[in-house]
Image (cartoon, rainbow, N blue to C red):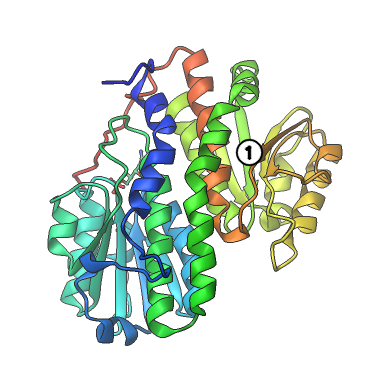
Amino acid sequence: EKGGFATFMEKEIYDQPQAVADTLLGRSDAEGNLILDELRISEDELKSIRKIIVLACGTSSYAGMVAKYAIERWCRIPVEVELSHEFRYRDPIIDANTLVVSISQSGETMDTLMAVRYAKEQGARTVSICNTNGSTIPRESDAVLYTHAGPEIAVASTKAFLAQITAAYLLGLYMAQLTKKLYSQEIKDILADLAEIPAKVQQILDNASQIKDLARAMAEASSVLFLGRNVGYPVALEGALKLKELAYIHAEGFAAGELKHGPIALIDEGQPVFVVVPSPMDRHSLHAKVVSNIQEVRARGAKTIVVAEAGDETVKEYAEQVFYVPETQPMLMPLLTTVPLQIFACELATAKGYDVDQPRNLAKSVTVE
Ligand code: M6R
């Protein structure tokens, strides 16, 4: 059942090309029109949406952060992302023109379920992005967009995360199609790039030996920092969470721009810092800014480990190690840059002799508040 892998975690990391492909399957026609029948909210209702609130916990909330960048860019609708357990206990402003998108692998996370119920009571439309057919959150939501990652057994989420991001992109494209905020050619182009993602993830998996070697060499690290910016920021948070969960190593993810506002004080000789570098094609020209962050931490003694897009030669000079991922459009990069970080955490934890499928103190689905 582990498909020849030693652990479910490893199998699920290697399942990711399929998870993304299956989540895309059948959701657009040959003309590049999105077909999301399962949405079950009328087109008119969706067109009237003025605000989107994404609710989730843990890894799923990082998929929500990626969704925010994509939906705001493509649909020009404001998106807030909030941890479900925080959302419920303030007085959020919701009405019938608010779309609440919950993201949950299990569909049973109590914090998220309670938040969705609350949002419904307040009159919001609710959509669930979920990996588990027939689970409670999709059942109680107005509509569901299933991720087709297949059952995720390992406690730490991997393939569900990539599938959630994929589904969030589809939702964003669908809304952009309805509201005509993107030209149909733009939607087609993004869909074509998405269709290439599974093969690109496979390429990363096929060339994982460098990152695995690094992970084994770093088994004694006591703290690892992760920096990212824009869509790379949630990737940095996810890289840090995987390392905490699997290897019990202190790890923090930061928005790279925040470095000078405090975290740079943590940097001293030998501190490992992963940097998720934006595409050189990013339209906000963030690439140069993040490259200068690499220089700043390196000048203070950090051991810099960089995840960058293939062909990006500029980072080489400042990095101890560079892991290249295939090129794609900047918005889609999280589907690729996450993968080396997952492999790193899984391999490092395995080198330490830990059970990566059942990390201590954690449950696969958190059904208590
Ligand atoms: O099933 P859900 O997606 O609602 O779960 C949310 C979190 O509990 C989950 O992502 C958790 O953070 C994982 N341990 C991450 O690896």
Vertical relation: 65 (above or below) 172? above
Identity of the residue drawn at 40% across and 61% down: 168
Identity of the residue drawn at 52% across and 14% down: 351
**Element assignment for label 1:** strand
Q: Position of residue 132 (x, y in %)?
A: 21, 46
Residue count near mark 1 (Cα–Cα under 10 Å), binned few <14, some 14–19, many ≥20: many
Vertical relation: 163 (above or below) 272? below
Vertical relation: 88 (above or below) 200? below
Does residue 306 appear in this view?
Answer: yes
Ligand 1 quadrant in view: top left
Does residue 91 appear in this view?
Answer: no
Q: Nearer the viewer, residue 195 or 297?
A: 195
Identity of the residue drawn at 36% across and 70% down: 53
Total tally of numbered discs in the picture: 1
Vertical relation: 152 (above or below) 83? above
Q: From the image, which quarter does the N terminus lie in? A: top left
- Amino acid type for the residue under numbered disc 1: Leu
Q: Position of residue 151 (x, y in %)?
A: 25, 37
Q: Position of residue 84 (x, y in %)?
A: 31, 59
Q: Quadrant of residue 120?
A: bottom left
Residue indicated by mark 1: 225
| Side of 85 where 208 appears, left or right | right
Q: Quadrant of residue 280?
A: bottom right
